[in-house]
Image (cartoon, rainbow, N blue to C red):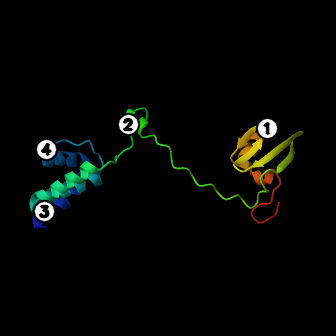
Amino acid sequence: MPLNLTHEVAALDRLGVADLRLRFAALFGEPTRAGNKTWLIKRLAWRLQALAEGDLSERARRRAAELAQDADLRLTPPRPGTAAAQRSTVDPPPTPPRPPDPRLPPVGTVLTRVYKGRTLHVTILSHGFECDGTVYASLSATAKAVTGSHCNGFLFFGLPGRGGQP
């Protein structure tokens, strides 16, 4: 880079955001709403260098335009409630089934626990845990529904923990 260009780019760092925005408007011919000082400095430094040393070649501009035509991506997600947001709601790919937890008894086993005078029966299913007609994703979720507060499902139902102890 020429020496005066180096000094100009270095001087950008000493400017405030308001001054950088004024400089942006002068160099680009349009105002900016950006308030990020780092971004403004990078854009201004690029523009100063492009003006001093030359911009992209016409061939590079055509290629960039071709790539932009094929681009099918957004830089920001659509706002909720807009038509674009409704179009972009695609079902997520299915998650692969997790292997069963080795601490759990086999599918079909019924766990019984007395809690505050009430006998609970929880059936272990292949896809969750059924208690009082409701299917829960985990033993902890089942215990939370019963007790009203979070607790470890393995401890609540008396199953062995990680080390094999109940």
- Quadrant assignment for the C terminus: bottom right
Please tell me which residue is depicted at 70% across the width and 58% down the height of the picture. Answer: 100
Residue at mark 1 to residue at mark 4: CA–CA distance: 68 Å
Task: In this rendered view, identify the residue nearer to me: 11 or 48.
Answer: 48
What residue did someone put label 4 on?
A: 29
**Amino acid found under the numbered disc labelled 3:** Leu
Left or right placement of residue 163 versus residue 57 in this view: right
What residue did someone put label 2 on?
A: 84
Describe the element under mark 1 as helix, strand or loop. Answer: loop
* Mark toward the start of the polypeptide (1 vs 4): 4
Residue at mark 2 to residue at mark 4: CA–CA distance: 31 Å
Please tell me which residue is depicted at 28% across the width and 53% down the height of the picture. Answer: 39
| Residues under numbered marks 4 and 3 in contact, where contact means CB atoms less than 8 Å apart | no
| Callout count | 4
Describe the element under mark 3 as helix, strand or loop. Answer: helix
Residue at mark 2 to residue at mark 1: CA–CA distance: 42 Å
* Mark toward the start of the polypeptide (2 vs 1): 2
Left or right placement of residue 12 versus residue 107 in this view: left
Q: Furthest-right residue in view?
A: 117
**Amino acid found under the numbered disc labelled 2:** Ala
